[in-house]
Amino acid sequence: MNQKRFASHALRELVSSLKLPLLQAEDASSPSECFDLANSKLWLTELDWSDEAAQLREAAVSNPTAYTVELAYKLLRRLRLVDQQITELDDGLLKCAELQELTLTGNHLTSVPLHYLPPNLKVLELCYNELESTSDLRHCSLELLHLGLAYNKLSALDLQPSNWSSLLSLDLSYNRLVDLPAAIKVIVELEQLRNLSLKGNPLTLVPCYHGYTVDSLAGLTSLDDNDITALEQETVSGMADLCDKQQDLIRYARVHFKVKSLSGLPELEEVPDTAEQIMISLIEVHHSFLPHVLYQLAGPSLISVSTQNIPMPPNPNPVDIPNDANHGDMHWCRLNPLPYATSVSDCDSLATSFRVEDLLSLAQFLEVGLDVRVCLVRKAYAKEGGGEGKPQGAKPGRGTPQSGRSSATKKSQHSNTKKETKGKGKVVASGNSGPPGEGWKESSILQLPLVTWHLELTPILEGRPLVEAMLEDTLTSALRTSAAFKSTEEGQGSDGGRVQIGVALSVDRYDCVSSCVV
């Protein structure tokens, strides 16, 4: 915002709004008309900017000549300058000498010079502004009871605790705080603090956030708008010491993604094998994630996940990544492929876990949400140099009559002692997704995205450990009529072309010492 707007300007406009109807009514044709016009406009005036506004309105109506802006300033105890486009504080607020509560929510403040605040102030609410630092609040002579700094851009705390000895409540939710030990080191010195909110900050994504905070701040009675019970304090006792020794528990997040079920995929058109070529059809599940992670705990190799950006076709429902997200575009993670089938019930291999150090980027990813897509992958293998190689356990030239998989894939599955259910195209285990055997070379590959879904993940930022959902969508008409799939209604999957996938994304949260695992 380029144009400056001072807090005193917004205050004067609101206070003067009670006098303005009286001035506008002076041009009425008669005294009674003047009184009626003034009254009607006064009672329509918004009064939510102060608890004393109604009292001031009565004063303006009963004695218009005595009502002045200066009188209003003296009577104000609670003032709410919300969404007033304020960019700076100035000494105009000092005229409200008896002011005890000041709300400046939803403005454009980048600094808060405390010497411009009334001396008797007890409550200061600054949420939804553009504060990037608390350095202006370091030396405070006010005896504040509550300080609200939610929904700003704070990345660190720079307070002098000895100057905040009276503070009972501190709201730091939905900022950019990433260092839990550093934040607790400052907050623990606020000896009178009873209510604290840190939810929505990246630091809440580490496994021991809740227990470490409660154990470190023994005087707290409420954390993130939830009361702290005596039993809870006993349960997390000792967690602060443990985490100080095992820093991974408060420095890194552990994120898990899992596909729980997949069904409704269309049945493939048969592609008979020949003596010269083998076709293998696979299912691949991709999900979006950060382009850089420290390392994976399990799942596909790190190289295929964190450095390979799998090409993606245009998304019909794109999700905009915030402009201030410094982590760049999300990358696609490719999970272990499975032999193609219309339904997959055993999805143990469709899971991966990450250990993430960049908590800010992780929080931004959760704000954007998760994209998941399912692809058909067809790999063609040709015989090398006229050799005698054959696919393991396969008879060249025979196709697969049920699921659209080649004989090589089906037999290769069996040779790997994987189980396959009886029934149309239903695979229970991952089978073999590699080359069909010696003497065969991959000659071509087709990757066809079938369906893409989006999953909201903000509940994890709000404190939930898990978000899971059953997502479904219909194949496009172009895909339904593709030569790759059977054109009959029967071939469009058991759900008539509606593909369903059950997915879950979670972060580790340990609520007691015994559950902590490094």
Image: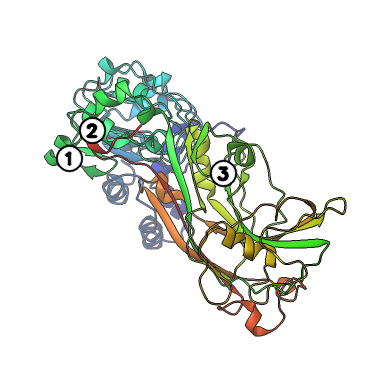
Is the Cβ of the residue at disc 2 closer than 8 Å to that at disc 1?
Answer: yes
Residue 507's disc is: none
Q: Which residue is mark 3?
A: 300
Secondary structure under badge 2? helix
The colour style of the image is: rainbow
Q: Which residue is mark 1?
A: 232
In this rendering, position of residue 42 left or right of residue 339 = left
Counting residues from the start of the chain, the first of labels 2 and 1 encountered is 2
- The answer to which quarter of the image holds residue 485 is bottom right
Q: Residue furthest left?
A: 230
Q: How many marks?
A: 3
Q: Quadrant of residue 463?
A: top left
Amino acid residing under circle 2: Val
Label 2 belongs to which residue? Answer: 214
Q: Is residue 163 visible?
A: yes
The numbered mark, 2 or 3, whose residue comes first in the sequence reads: 2
Task: Tell me the kind of residue under disc 1.
Answer: Glu
285 sits to left or right of 396: left
In the displayed structure image, the side of residue 172 where residue 343 appears, left or right:
right
